[in-house]
Image: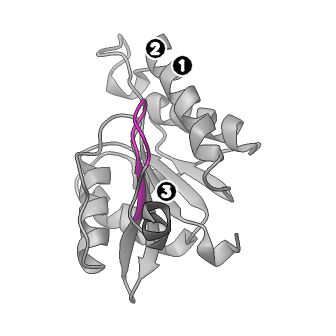
Amino acid sequence: MTPRELPLLLVRHAVAEDAHALGDGARALTPEGRALFRQHARKLARLTPLVGIFTSPLVRAVQTAELLAECFGLSQVEVHPALLPRKGAHTRILKLARSVGPGYALVGHNPSLERALALALEAGGDEAPDKLRKGTVAALQPSGKKGYRLDWWAAPGRTVKHFGPEALTRAR
């Protein structure tokens, strides 16, 4: 796979604890969320390589990104403020996606990640097949000047859904 063929992955953090004494930013992944996402990430690593990973600085996103890095054989993740869940984050996420390009995973939170996905796919004439649930990964390919098309969609514990040209080949 050439760097241009690599997808851009939008990754919602895995299942985290409901509350933490130090506040929302300190919520960690649950043991079950960690185990399920590790298994999921191993499956994803068989689909595509990654060049790098950017993550929100919130604990649950960093832990999700670290699991991705472990399974993809990457030595580090980079924290980026554009992935913080705050007002207008969806436009900052899309700007980051365009600047890093294919081969990267962006790990973040809803609703900003889901809104960024909707905006990216709308510009490419596409739409998400489902809600971006915890641990779900949307693989995007550039389409047109500013849009993206959905290549595949992977939710933990479910079969990967292919949408790009590869899906036609698999259907035959």
Where, by quadrant of the figure, is residue 76 drawn? Answer: top right
Distance, label 1 to label 3, CA atoms, is: 20 Å
Distance, label 2 to label 1, CA atoms, is: 5 Å
Say which residue appears at 27% left-offset and 52% top-offset: 114
The residue tagged 1 is 35
Give the mark nearest the N terminus, 1 or 3.
3
Q: Is residue 145 above or below residue 69?
A: below
User: In the rendered view, does 120 fall on the left or right side of 106?
Assistant: left
Query: Mark 2 near mark 1, Cβ–Cβ under 8 Å?
Result: yes
Q: Main secondary structure of the magenta part?
A: loop
Q: Magenta segment range? A: 151-160
Residue 125 spot, x, y in % from top left: 24, 78
Snapshot colouring: one colour
Give the number of the disc on residue 32: 2
Say which residue appears at 61% left-offset and 64% top-offset: 103
Q: Is residue 36 above or below residue 70?
A: above
Where, by quadrant of the figure, is residue 14 drawn? Answer: top left
Give the number of the disc on residue 9: 3
Q: Secondary structure at mark 1?
A: helix
Say which residue appears at 30% left-offset and 66% top-offset: 91
Structural crowding at the residue carrying mark 3, measured as other residues with C-alpha within 10 Å and reported as few (<14), some (14–19) or many (≥20): many
Would residue 171 be seen by someone viewing this image from the given angle?
yes
- Disc 1 residue type? Ala
